[in-house]
Image (cartoon, rainbow, N blue to C red):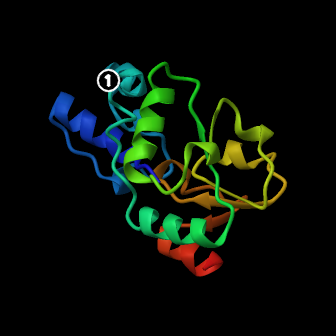
Amino acid sequence: MADAYQAHLDIYEKDFGVRFTKEDCLGREFWHCVPVDHQASVKDHAWQVGYFRNLKVIPDSQEVLAELSSRHDVYIASAAMQFPNSLREKSDWLDEHFPFIPWQKRILCGHKHVLKGDVLIDDRAYNLEKFEGRRLLFTSPHNTGLTDFERVSSWKEIASLFL
C-alpha cells in the first residue's frame, strides 16, 4: 500500500545528493547500500516527523483494495508501535488514501504474529512466518532473494488472485 522503500531513496537523495534506484538495492535493506557513515542517517528516517504521513501510495493499491473491500472482509494491519510518530501518521495516511477502510478495520499493532485470518500480504517475511493462513510476500527490493513464501509483485497481481 505504502512505498516505504522509495521514501528512503528519496530522502537519501535529498540529504546527500546521491540517487539510488530500487534495482541498485535488490536483496538488501537500503541502509546496507549506502556508505557506513550514512547508515545511521538512513536508519533514522522512520523516526522523522512526516516520514509515514508522506509515503507514496503503491500503484493500483487503492483501486484493488476498494474492490476487495466491497467483496471481502478486508482489514489493514500495520506495525505502528515501533516509531513514536508512526501510529498517528499511519492513521492519517489511511484516512487520506484509503477512506473506504474504516478505523474499525484497521489494526495498528506491534508484532503481527497475533493476527489470524485467511490471507496476509506483507513485504516483511518475519510478519508472515507465524501466520496460519495464505501468506503472500509482496515484492520489495529488500526481499527479492527470499523464496519461502508465495510472492506477489503488484496490486494487479493480487486482484487477479482474489477478484
| Residue at horizontal 36 percent and vertical 57 percent from the top | 23
| Residue at horizontal 67 percent and vertical 68 percent from the top | 72
Residue 108 in view (yes/no): yes
Query: Can you identify the residue that label 1 sits on?
Result: 38
Report whether 133 appears left or right of 9.
right
Report whether 22 appears left or right of 66.
left
Say which quadrant the C terminus sits in. Answer: bottom right
Figure check: 119 above or below 41:
below
| Residue at horizontal 57 percent and vertical 51 percent from the top | 123
Report whether 158 appears left or right of 125.
left
Q: Nearer the viewer, residue 79 or 14?
A: 79
Figure check: 18 above or below 157:
above
Label 1 CA crowd tier, 10 Å (few <14, some 14–19, many 20+): some
Q: Nearer the viewer, residue 123 or 20?
A: 123
Dot 1 amino acid type: His
Residue 32 in view (yes/no): no
Residue 7 occupies which quadrant of the picture? top left
- For the residue labelled by badge 1, is the local secondary structure a helix, a strand or a loop? helix
Horizontal and vertical percent for residue 90?
Answer: 46, 36
Report whether 140 appears left or right of 69.
left
Q: Nearer the viewer, residue 145 or 93?
A: 93
Horizontal and vertical percent for residue 84?
Answer: 49, 18
Q: Nearer the viewer, residue 21 or 113?
A: 113
Horizontal and vertical percent for residue 125?
Answer: 66, 48
Residue placed furthest toward the left: 17
Residue 47 occupies which quadrant of the picture? top left
Horizontal and vertical percent for residue 139?
Answer: 52, 59
| Residue at horizontal 38 percent and vertical 38 percent from the top | 33
Figure check: 85 above or below 53:
above
